[in-house]
Image: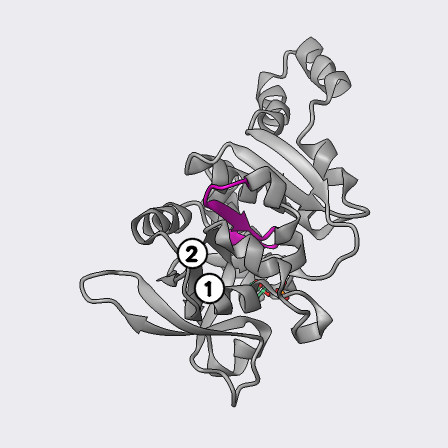
């Protein structure tokens, strides 16, 4: 099963990501998929046989949740072909995107819907005319799992200017403890840069490397800005983070929350099964 289809409480992880985009008004969605990812397309498609069974049974609640996934937006798909890295995947969107700024959401990063991020990034992109990345503070020892940004404050603004970016630096080389997470709002100038970005770390075409050029070079659409996110983020590619996402989202849900709250403390303390 593709990891994006892992259920988080009652929906696959990818549905949260699509809902996040739709919630800030992005309805034209392009999914860059690959081999073995057909389940994603099926999930966002209609399921006529299931829908008519539920209709026949009068189960309107389940019917609504099955139909919800197929009504989210206008979803297009393109396959990455050979996986040459995140930069290569983003480049596959060039033709679809055209000349407009666009958002990139990585399928294994979940941003809690109660915390604001993408809308702010879109506003910062519109204001600056450059590209915008999302940053979190991590323990210095964790930085080598992420792209890392050297930033400086901008007077009077809540976002920062990005001076330099390094993909997955060693702890010693890292310019800060600010890590890139899987949300970007990019100026289309990134495509032309990606086209000539040589394979970098892991022999892959790195989006971070293209953004480093946009941060340091000069030209239309250049300049990279960062929004530091302090809300809840879950990495479904990490087992512990995935489990935390399930618990945190379930505990606050109306139907599952009360039962889980009652049971969890005793279970965690070893007092109940
Ligand atoms: C990618 C990016 C990295 C970023 C990370 C966030 O890495 O290359 O800069 O910090 O996503 O999840 P990946 O996790 O795909 O190796």
Instruction: Decide if ligand 1 comes within 8 Å of the CB at mark 1.
Output: no
Q: Which image quarter: residue 55?
A: top right
Asked whether the viewer can see residue 262, the reply is no
Q: Is residue 99 magenta?
A: yes
Residue 62: give x, y in percent of width and height: 62, 23
Residue 190: give x, y in percent of width and height: 52, 56
**What is the count of numbered marks?**
2
Q: Are marks 2 and 1 in contact (CB under 8 Å)?
A: yes
| Residue at which label 2 appears | 131
Mark 2: few, some, or many residues within 10 Å (few <14, many ≥20)? many
| Residue at which label 1 appears | 214
Mark 1: few, some, or many residues within 10 Å (few <14, many ≥20)? many
Residue placed furthest toward the top:
56
Q: Is residue 157 magenta?
A: no
- What stretch of residues is rendered in magenta? 98-110
Residue placed furthest toward the bottom:
172
């Amino acid at each position: 099963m593709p990891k994006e289809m892992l259920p988080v409480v009652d929906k696959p992880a990818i549905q949260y990501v699509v809902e996040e985009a739709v919630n800030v008004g992005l309805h034209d969605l392009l999914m860059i998929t690959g081999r073995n990812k057909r389940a994603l397309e099926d999930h966002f498609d209609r399921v006529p046989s299931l829908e008519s069974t539920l209709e026949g049974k009068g189960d309107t609640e389940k019917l609504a949740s099955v139909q919800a996934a197929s009504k989210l937006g206008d979803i297009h798909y393109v396959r990455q072909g050979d996986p040459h890295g995140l930069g290569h995947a983003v480049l596959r969107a060039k033709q679809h995107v055209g000349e407009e700024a666009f958002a990139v959401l990585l399928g294994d990063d979940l941003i809690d819907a109660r915390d604001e991020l993408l809308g702010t990034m879109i506003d910062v992109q519109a204001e600056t005319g450059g590209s915008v990345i999302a940053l979190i503070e991590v323990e210095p020892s964790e930085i080598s799992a992420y792209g890392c940004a050297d930033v400086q404050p901008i007077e009077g603004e809540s976002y920062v200017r990005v001076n330099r970016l390094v993909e997955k630096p060693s702890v010693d080389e890292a310019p800060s403890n600010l890590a890139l997470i899987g949300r970007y709002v990019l100026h289309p100038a990134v495509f032309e840069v990606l086209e000539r970005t040589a394979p970098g770390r892991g022999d892959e075409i790195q989006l971070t490397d293209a953004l480093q050029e946009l941060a340091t070079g000069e030209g239309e659409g250049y300049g990279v800005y960062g929004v530091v996110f302090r809300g809840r983020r879950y990495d479904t590619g990490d087992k512990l983070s995935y489990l935390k996402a399930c618990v945190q989202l379930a505990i606050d849900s109306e139907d599952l929350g009360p039962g889980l709250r009652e049971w969890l403390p005793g279970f965690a303390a070893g007092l109940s099964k």
